[in-house]
Image (cartoon, grey):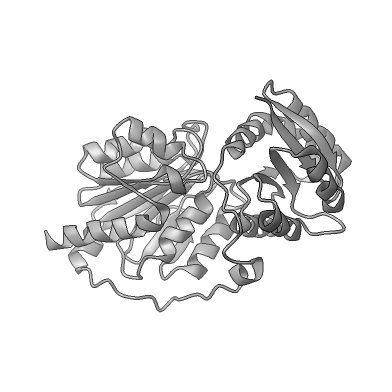
Amino acid sequence: MTIRVLVVDDSALMRALLTQIINDAPDIEVVGSAPDPIAAREMIKVLNPDVLTLDVEMPKMDGLEFLDRIMRLRPMPVIMISAMTERGSEVTLKALELGAVDFVAKPRAESISLMHSYAEEICDKIRAAKGARLKGTPARTLAAAVAAPAHKAGTSAGFSQRLLNDTIIAIGASTGGTEAIKDVLVALPADMPPIVMTQHMPETFTPSFAKRLDTLSALTVIEAQGGERLQPGHAYLAPGHSHMVIRRTAGGYVTELNQNEPVNRHRPSVDVLFWSVAEQAKGPVIGVILTGMGKDGAQGLLSLRNGGAHTIGQDQASCVVYGMPREAALVGAVAEVASLDGVSNAILNQLRRLDRG
C-alpha cells in the first residue's frame, strides 16, 4: 500500500525538492504540500496523510507549536526537516521530545541541491515512520520539558570501586534513540561505570544532544573528541562525523575516533563501537541496543555476548521502530529483553550481580 505524505515547508524550492524525491519512490507519494501550518491543518483534515514532513521554522506558527498541537489533537507520524545549525539541532531535539518520530537535516541554502543525495535516507525514514509507535498525548508540554530540573547531585548506588573501574557499558540506538537514551541515563545514579554510546545523528546535532543529556542526568555526558580516558560517572557519545572505538592502555581505556568507511551505511556505527568493546575490554561488559531502524549493532552485540557480556535489547512494545533490537534478537545477540522503562533497572541489576560476584 502506498504511503501518503504531506509536505509542510515555507520554502517553495524545498517543497518541490521533497515532492520530487518522495514521488520517485515506488511505494510513497506526496498527496499535498503546504507553505505553513495553517494551510497544513486544513489539508490534514481533507487528505488524511500517513506521514507528515514538517519544517522547524515557518511563518504564522512555529513548527514546534504546530507539532505540539498535532500530537495532542491528532497524533500522526512526523518527520522534522531541520537546518544543520546549532539552533536547528536544539529545536529538533525538543521536537523529538514532543513526539516527532525522526528528522532529516537539510543542507544550508547554498547547498540545497544536495538534498537529492539524501533521497534514500528520506524515503527510508518515511517508511519507518509509517509503522512507528507514537507517543500519543505527550506526558510533558514543551515548556515542562525545557524546564525539567537537572539533578547533578545524583544518588549513589553504592557500587564497589573495583566494579566502577573494571566495567564498561556500551549503548547503541538510532530512530527514537534520542529520547530512549535520555530515559535510560536519567534513571541511572551518578556512580556508574563508564558508558560509551553511539546514536545515529549528524555531526551538527551530537554536541547539543550530549549537552542535553549532561543537563538532565546525574552523569557527566560529553561528546567524545578522542583520547578521553574512560572514567566512572561519565558517558561518552560518538560524534556525528566519526566512528568511536575504545582502546586498552596501561592507564585504562581511552576513546579513539576514526573516519573509516561507513558500516551498515552509518558513521558512527553501533557495530564498530560494540566490536571494539568486545575486542578491547577485559573486565565485565554490559551491551544495550535500543530502538532504531535497520540492523546496525546486531553483529556487534553478538560479539559482545559471545565474549561473555550481558546483553540487553529493548522490547518491541516500547520501541519507536523495532528494527535494530529485532535484528539483534534474531541472531541470538540479546540475553535479556526489557521495556524502555526497564532498561536502566536491567543494567543496575546486572551491576549488582557483578558486584556480589
Image height check: is 295 above or below 257?
Answer: above
* Residue closer to the observer: 311 or 84: 311
Residue at coordinates 38% horizontally, 53% vertically from top-left? 196
Image height check: is 29 above or below 106?
Answer: above
Q: Quadrant of residue 272?
A: top left
* Residue closer to the observer: 177 or 30: 30
Q: Is residue 56 left or right of residue 357?
A: right
Q: Quadrant of residue 137?
A: bottom right
Q: How many marks?
A: 0
Q: Is residue 347 left or right of residue 83?
A: left
Q: Is residue 8 visible?
A: no
Q: Position of residue 71 (x, y in %)?
A: 66, 55
Residue at coordinates 46% horizontally, 45% vertically from top-left? 291
Q: Is residue 261 left or right of residue 21?
A: left
Q: Position of residue 139 (x, y in %)?
A: 57, 64
Q: Is residue 95 visible?
A: yes
In the picture, the quarter occupied by the N terminus is top right
